[in-house]
Image (cartoon, rainbow, N blue to C red):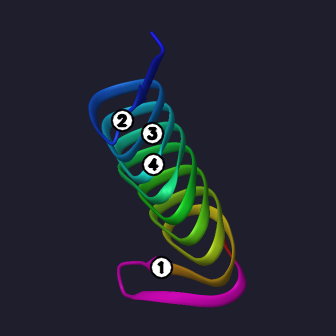
């Protein structure tokens, strides 16, 4: 079933379709989540707004001023993009990722590396990658 929700403050367990509001929260989103503040546990689709946060797993795109996710398969487009694990692309002013295989395009790109002996951050302008 396709959901279509429009409201100021939305809280749902699962959305299959379109969610539009000022503050949106859903356990699981399959489709589009659009608002000033978007929060979800899992996303399969597209999240767009001022602040976008995915607590667990994302398949798809985040577009906003601040984008953050735990594990992301897809892309992040914004002023500040941050994820713990990325398989895809980050495009923005500041791009920050830990693990995964990815390409970063931004004014400042940060990649955190850890192994059993050390932990360090690589910072480069314009382009960053890990394959």
**Is the Cβ of the residue at disc 1 closer than 8 Å to that at disc 3?**
no
Q: Residue drawn at (38%, 40%), measured in percent from left and top?
A: 42
Quadrant for the C terminus in the image? bottom right
Kindly identify which residue carries mark 1: 113
In the drawing, what numbered circle is on residue 35? 4
Query: Mark 2 against mark 1, which lies toward the viewer?
Result: 2
**Label 4: how many Cα within 10 Å (few below 14, some 14–19, many 20+):** many
Q: Determine whether the residue tagged by mark 4 lies in a helix, strand or loop.
A: strand
Q: Is residue 125 magenta?
A: yes
Disc 1 and disc 3: Cα gap in Å? 26 Å
Whether residue 69 is situated above or below residue 17 in the rendered picture: below
In percent of width and height, residue 106 lies at: 68, 78
Residue 131 seen in this snapshot:
no
In percent of width and height, residue 24 lies at: 35, 44
Query: Mark 1 against mark 3, which lies toward the viewer?
Result: 3
In percent of width and height, residue 79 lies at: 58, 73
Residue 7 sits in quarter: top left
Whether residue 82 is situated above or below residue 118 in the rendered picture: above
In the drawing, what numbered circle is on residue 43? 3
Kindly identify which residue carries mark 2: 7
């Amino acid at each position: 079933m396709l959901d279509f929700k429009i409201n100021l403050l939305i809280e749902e367990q699962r959305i299959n379709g379109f969610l539009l509001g000022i503050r949106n929260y859903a356990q699981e989103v399959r489709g589009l989540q659009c608002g000033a503040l978007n929060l979800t546990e899992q996303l399969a689709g597209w999240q767009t707004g001022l602040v976008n946060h995915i607590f667990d797993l994302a398949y798809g795109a985040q577009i906003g001023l601040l984008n953050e996710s735990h594990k992301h398969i897809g892309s992040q487009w914004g002023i500040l993009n941050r994820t713990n694990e990325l398989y895809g692309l980050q495009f923005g002013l500041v791009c920050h990722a830990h693990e995964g295989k990815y390409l970063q395009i931004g004014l400042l790109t940060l990649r955190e590396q850890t192994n059993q002996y050390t932990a360090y951050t690589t910072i480069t302008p314009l382009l960053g990658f890990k394959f």
